[in-house]
């Protein structure tokens, strides 16, 4: 298929792009960035790039038309902090951006539009611990708000016009290359830096169980979901997760696999950090994803840590 | 207060405007219509009118600035059929329209923004019969979809920027002057035309119980809600209803009050009509509205029919 | 060719549509109007209609894609009074509308885009009497301002991306069906009403020479221009006119052809009427149009009056 | 006055900001950049900064409202190369950006809006050498196209709504800190690098006379123009220039003032470079600016080179 990966220079978009290329599919990356970041530099020259702004229909339309796209993976998004800092901009990028994709897909007859949604749609402060398809979505920040709007609009375009919109809600995705931002850094950082032989300082609460999804499992789910026959799907949006662990458990596993790992602690007890911490403390019931498109995570705690370390070392080597 | 009533030339907006004027408040009507429709012609000359497009920020901003508005009642909306006919336009009017109001309210410090939402946010095909605050919103048409988006965005602006967004979900609103559209006409028509001494032909299923709200109760709820102190509110969006009745019960009451009423039947058994019919078959639990801002309907079946008839006759006279 | 005529339910758009149909071409009308006005009612059922808003790219894109358009005639526009009343709306409809057409033409490879421009680009208050290709455009109202913006943007898209943008500047166009608005009514009205056997009252100054273009000549020019080979064109925008006459001369001709014509006078000497009057007092040098695509008017004063009368009588009959 | 300087982190915006601060006026910088570039780092902490996108009305409105702005200097713009690379984006930033400023100025009653326009409005390939107020504007690239659109829209808002729009057309502006882009670098670079004691390599044709304006004169003109009484202005847009010189003459002057200056030549004879070279070969008649607001350049060739060198050395020291 000829795929457009929006946000293809990002952490998950780049990984997805590599997988699609490995499968022999064509990929065009759509991104607002001027150039590939370091962790995605290997893609340079291997894929077409359409630089553009997802909120400008001209860019979206031109990409789909020029490259005769039949499959879109929509990974571009303003994330939590950027959305909270500028609601109007978050609406423009996340919601108007999706509207552009939905309309272009409808008008041009794009065969598949798979978009990333988030566990934040269930609340980013105190989501219920056990989340299944009957759990009510009550977003409490702008990121989650825009993601629920996107899900609803996508479902409406499917119902009304047959646009093949599908969306996966992901929990915290972990893997090499993930930006180590202050509030969301520890989960990946506690593996990535020790794997590079560097010390790491932990700031979050380490005994709260959190939902993890290893990036490779996220990519696997996206592809399986896109390829699932329509007749198998009972819904348009599925929850997909990996496993639940406390950071203590992750650290113990890292130390087991990297005996000399230097991990220190300087806990940030601010309300904001606590909120971010709590916001990831949930477990997705993935029954529907398993039954409808065969998704099951390959990477639980041990496997994730092992592969993460191996990938970091491969990149360094 | 200096109020801006968007959609003030519409059925509910006009009634609300009359009530505000009667209370001695100032009102500016914001509407895309060129002139007052017949049922609102009495307002001509009594209120300022700002003609404008809710999706054009220039118009919204100018209205708020020129008239130094401190209270907005947002009644303008594309309704069910128009939204379903043009999703992109419904997004523009309903969602971008609200974003304009939220941003203008934030930037200009408007004190109150009360918006109308809908029972359609619970689904317009087969909503659960008993709806309370724990019921999950699962819109299944574009109108309901845009209304949930509006609620979520409004709540976010309140949480993040303190914009005093409040919204009431209304069931089917009935009253004199309501446009008697094909699918939504019978509920008001079966009273309005007999009150005018004209025959009326019923097309919907008459034994399905439906949620009713008399327009005067809707207006009363909007005002009480706006005036409720912040400290009393446990949520930003409340369900407000009147009573539940089948059309058979309404017709019996009409015939009781207008002995010679000519009501005939030509049932439309199409799937679409059935869907519209079912979509109004629910009962709102209004406990929160009662406890938090003292709302209780004044008009149950008997009172509604009596007042409706009296109003129609007053207008004719 | 498969033509899209924007504003196809308007005076000139409808006439152009009839001509294209008569030539055996396909026509899709793009218009914001819900239905054909009386003077264009004959087109109902003979052409496809795409209702839409030129400022909404979704509508423009969908029309071009669904009907596989290869030729666009762009007649949709806010005219003088509407533009002056709402600058922001005029920008949206006239300028953003053209941008949508330019981008859709570029992206979809539409072969031809012929747009209507205006003598108002030379000023609507006191244009120079003799206008040729060296005359500087100095618009002095919003309509003329938006039209110059459109010309410049169109030329840029042609230069930069090869979009086949062409545009004709028209003077006052006269013909049956033209809306007889207060300020622009007399020129057509003084023929149309007497031809219907009705009296007509003239308000403008009758001894100022004005530039006339009969609607059939406008249509002829649009078609010849679209079909002119690229190699023949020395510019992208041409001035096209008919003849110059005072209203006195027109009235004399009407009375010659309709001996009993009742034409009375009630001159409006307001500054505004004088401005509108003066704004049409110019003569286009059409040398370039004649040399490059063979345009010459078929209808001078006598022929225009005769054909206008005949058309009005044909429609009545 | 409370000034908003759009593009205030840019070359000219920063210089203007310094001057306003030195005059004791308040300045808020509006810029899309995340942080001050090196040459403007001195402003950090001395001015308020509103980060925002000029094409997003929310940002513009918020800046004007929050800081109670009464004077806007509009320096933000996509320049030549960026405009040519993405016409749709240039329209958004340059034209929609100005529309936002015009509407906000109108609605909020901002007292003064001074915008920068350009000699490129007369053509960027082969402008006439002598340009005065009667010269026709014939832009031939997107930058010039958007600037003419801005001038026309600004004049319309002044005429129709009394918005105090004023605009200065500037030729090539030279001064320390100007970005030394490939096509526009030599004019500033040939002074800046020798002043830093570094060698400079010249690529453009050195015997073509070009119009120069030293940045300090540009700032002086902007302030004098803003402060000119309305009654003195015969137009809304004025041409403002400094002097005309060939690069040979500039180089000779640099070598006179910096005896050891290392300037080498590697002429780029490409058509594109020639075009950029020719595009600056014109002389503005500044009579109107002199008569109406007393503008005369302080810096001719000798003075400009001397001050430029002194400023560079001051910054280094």
Image (spheres, coloured by chain):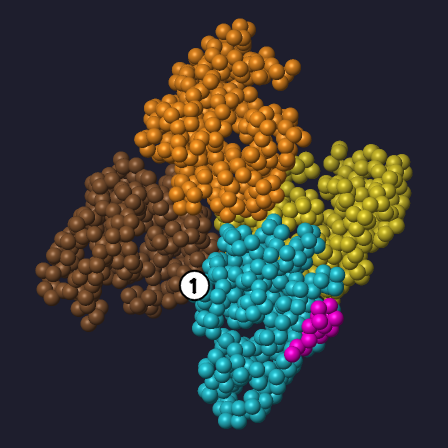
Chain colours: A cyan, B yellow, C orange, D brown
Q: Nearer the viewer, residue D149 or C272?
A: D149
Residue C2 in percent (x, y) is at 57, 36
Q: Nearer the viewer, residue A303 or B15?
A: A303
Q: How many marks?
A: 1
Q: Which residue is mark 1?
A: A34
Q: Quadrant of the image for the N terminus of chain C?
A: top right
**Extreme residue toward the bottom, this view:** A259
Residue D81 in percent (x, y) is at 35, 54
In the rendered structure, the answer to whether residue B315 lies left or right of residue C162 reads right
Segment tinted magenta in the rendering: A282-298
Residue C245 visible from this viewpoint: yes
Membership of A293 in magenta stretch: yes
In the rendered structure, the answer to whether residue C210 lies left or right of residue D315 reads right
Whether B280 is drawn above or below B10: the answer is below
In the rendered structure, the answer to whether residue C161 lies left or right of residue C133 reads right
What residue lies at 65% left-to-right and 15% top-to-bottom? C317
| Element under disc 1 | loop
Q: Nearer the viewer, residue B63 or C257?
A: C257
Membership of A61 in magenta stretch: no
What residue lies at 88% left-to-right and 50% top-to-bottom? B207
Whether B200 is drawn above or below B222: the answer is above
């Amino acid at each position: 298929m000829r795929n457009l990966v929006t946000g293809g220079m990002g952490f998950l978009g780049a990984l997805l792009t590599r997988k699609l290329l490995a499968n022999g599919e064509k990929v065009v990356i759509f991104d607002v960035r001027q150039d590939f970041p370091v962790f995605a530099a290997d893609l340079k020259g291997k894929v077409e790039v359409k630089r553009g702004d997802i909120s400008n229909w001209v860019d979206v339309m031109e990409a789909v038309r020029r490259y005769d796209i039949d499959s879109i993976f929509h990974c571009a998004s303003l994330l939590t902090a950027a959305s909270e800092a500028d609601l109007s901009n978050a609406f423009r990028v996340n919601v108007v951006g999706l509207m552009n994709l939905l309309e272009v897909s409808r008008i041009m007859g794009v065969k598949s539009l798979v978009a990333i949604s988030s566990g934040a749609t269930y609340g980013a402060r105190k989501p219920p611990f056990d989340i299944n398809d009957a759990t009510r979505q009550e977003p409490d920040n702008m990121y989650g708000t825009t993601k629920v709007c996107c899900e609803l609009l996508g479902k409406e375009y499917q119902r009304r016009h047959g646009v093949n919109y599908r969306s996966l809600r992901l929990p915290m995705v972990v893997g090499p290359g993930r930006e180590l931002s202050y509030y969301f850094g520890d989960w990946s950082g506690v593996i990535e830096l020790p794997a590079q032989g560097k010390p790491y300082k932990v700031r979050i609460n380490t005994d709260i169980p959190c939902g993890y999804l290893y990036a490779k499992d996220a990519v696997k789910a996206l592809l399986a979901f896109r390829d699932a026959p329509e007749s198998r799907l009972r819904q348009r949006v599925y929850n997909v997760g990996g496993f639940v662990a406390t950071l203590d458990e992750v650290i113990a596993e890292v130390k087991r696999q990297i005996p000399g790992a230097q991990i220190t602690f300087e806990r940030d007890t601010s309300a904001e950090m606590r909120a971010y911490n709590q916001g990831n403390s949930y477990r997705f019931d993935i029954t529907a994803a398993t039954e409808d498109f065969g998704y099951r995570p390959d990477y639980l705690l041990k496997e994730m840590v092992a592969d993460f370390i191996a990938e970091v070392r491969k990149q360094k080597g």
